[in-house]
Image (cartoon, rainbow, N blue to C red):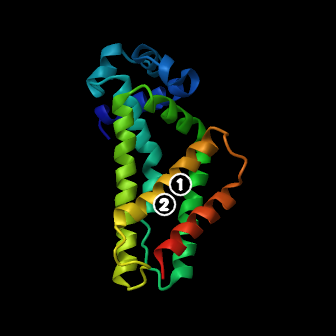
Amino acid sequence: MDKKDRTRILILAAAKRVFLEKGYKDTTIKLIAESAGLGYGTIYSHFKLGKEEVFATLIEEVMTPFYEIAQLTYTPRNKEQAYNFTYNNTYKYLTLAIQNKEIFKLIHEAKGMSELVNQKWEDITDKFIERISVNVEIVRSLGMIRNEHYHSEIVASFLYYLGERYLWELILDKTAIPIHEITRDIVTMYTHGLFK
């Protein structure tokens, strides 16, 4: 690892500490530089768009284990296997979000304040919907789809957006519904709607 990479890692670690302590709105490049023990200009030499780019990069790091869940091979032989696979992935997704609750609160805050961060979240959303769409097409190719006219993106969006809605409800403490019940209901509706 070269000096540039080490400096970038140092900046991101310092930024994460400052964002968690101060919140998105009150974090500045100056505070990140002080926390990292670096000059103000050094931050900009690595992140030309400043605070927004630093935070968008942190989001990508946080989402890495979520992408790993999404990339698991989907090969259901029947509706029950598909339900179990989707349940496990949805439950892991929501549980990971809870484990990263403070960062997700920051993402929620930043999405309303930064077009770059909001676009980053839209890009993440698109990745998940695209991946779920592949799974819908697998079901179609196996001849198990309930309706041949289903558009895979619409079906995938149903699962993703319902899951995202409850992700934010859980992160912001706006629901008392247990994760396993949220997961059960979302996955039941998705699976039974998708499969014959």
Disc 1 on helix, strand or loop?
helix
Q: Residues within 10 Å of mark 1 (few under 14, many from 20)?
A: many
Amino acid residing under circle 2:
Leu
- Tell me the quarter of the image containing the N terminus: top left
At horizontal 61% and vertical 61% (from top left) the residue drawn is: 183
The answer to whether the residues at label 2 and label 1 have Cβ atoms under 8 Å apart is yes
At horizontal 38% and vertical 23% (from top left) the residue drawn is: 51
Q: Can residue 7 be seen in this snapshot?
A: no
At horizontal 52% and vertical 54% (from top left) the residue drawn is: 162
Q: Which residue does the numbered mark 2 point to in the structure image?
A: 159
Q: Residues within 10 Å of mark 2 (few under 14, many from 20)?
A: many
Residues 16 and 141: in front is 141
Amino acid residing under circle 1:
Gly
Q: In the picture provided, is 48 more to the left or to the right than 76?
A: left
Disc 2 on helix, strand or loop?
helix
Q: How many marks?
A: 2
Residues 95 and 57: in front is 95
